[in-house]
Amino acid sequence: MSGAPECLTRGPLSWRQALACAQEALERSLGGARRHEAIWLARASAERDSAAWWTGIDDVADPERLQKLASVLARRCSGEPLSYVLGRSSFCGLELKVGPGVLVPRPETEVVVEEVLAQLATLGRPAAPLLVADLGTGSGAMALAVAAAEVRAKVWAVERSEQARRWASRNIRAQDSLADRVTLLAGSWFGGLPEFLRGRLDLVMSNPPYVSAAEMECLGAEVADWEPHEALAGGVSGLEPLEAIVAECPSWLARPGVLVVEVADSRGRESQALAVEAGASEAHIACDLAGRQRVLVARWNP
Ligand SMILES: C[S@@+](CC[C@H](N)C(=O)[O-])C[C@H]1O[C@@H](n2cnc3c(N)ncnc32)[C@H](O)[C@@H]1O
């Protein structure tokens, strides 16, 4: 197999030896310390949970499993993101299926979910369902995380990319208990929503593409070569998707109603100004755990 290390083909190997071989191959191809990645790939190939894998680390590895390890290693050594190779990613405690055609959900987006949950709690509607839209749902990460954490939330998740919708659809179907509260829709931003939601949404959330044209030129290869450009590119300024969302948001929100959007850390002030221009009663930028400006929170009061 091209790209797979030769040491994996040398006679019977224990999982400990296979792990050392995988780590060395990853570090040679990608640089940096790669022990954790090697463990993820070896464990996934062995199809053992963490405890079984560690207790059996000196077992002789089955040749078919080693072949599987060679195959996933070759993919990872060619630069394919680890989450694509594993076929999954974890987000807010949920395990999501991901692969080519969909953005791998990022840890910083968990801060957006926390802000959404905090804002829903301020709406003062203890009994009523909370109507939420997720614009540009990708894998369905935010829609599912909010539905999982807030049982009153009904989420309409809009996505323009057909490939991404396929991943979202799989993820929604995999979450039995949430599937009846998360509806996946095709379309562009608010254009994907049913008309009856106009003026009735309690909260609109989005992690839209926000990389400017100049920044797109400087993205690392692992992102630029593998993840979908339509999930990243925010037009020349990087603000075009946000501008489109903010402009239409007032006519879709109930009063009070809240917009929560992930923004580029360098664009907090401009994002806040856009919401104020669109008539928001209050707008502020929340920070992530590293103190970077990350989330636009805008509220329209009655
Ligand atoms: C940055 S990704 C976020 C995906 C997901 N919400 C997450 O946080 O992992 C942006 C998503 O918006 C989608 N998108 C881009 N333009 C869109 C549009 N006009 N209407 C709907 N979705 C769009 C992309 O396909 C992509 O899935």
Image: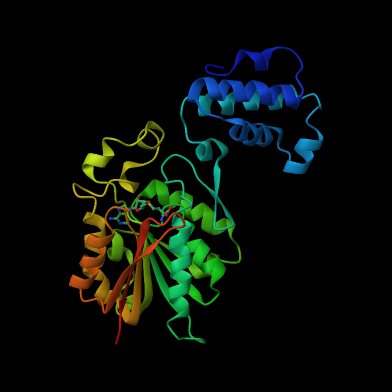
291 or 225, nearer to the observer:
291
Vertical side of 196 occupied by 113: above or below: above
Residue 108 seen anywhere in this rendered image of the structure: yes
Q: Name which residue lies at 33% across and 55% down.
A: 208
> Which is nearer the eye, 25 or 287?
287
User: Residue 128's spot in the image, x, y percent?
Assistant: 48, 85
Q: Residue furthest front?
A: 291
Residue drawn where x is 56% and y is 30% of the image: 33
Q: Quadrant of the C terminus?
A: bottom left
Image coords of residue 256 (percent x, y)? 34, 83
Left-right relation of 235 to 149 = left
Image quarter where the N terminus lies is top right
- Say how many tags the image has: 0
Query: In which image quadrant can residue 39 be found?
Result: top right
**Residue at the location (64% across, 27% down)?**
68
Question: Measured along the vertical axis of the image, is residue 182 above or below residue 125?
Answer: above
Which is nearer the eye, 254 or 264?
A: 264
- Residue 127, relative to residue 112: is it above or below? below
Is residue 49 in view?
A: no
Q: Residue at 37% across / 49% down in the picture? A: 162
What colouring method underlies this structural image? rainbow
Location of residue 119 in the rendering, given as x and y in whole percent from the top left corner = 43, 75
Q: Provide residue 233's location: percent of width, then percent of height.
A: 28, 46
Up the image or down, 210 lies above or below 150; here it is: above
* 130 lies left or right of 298: right
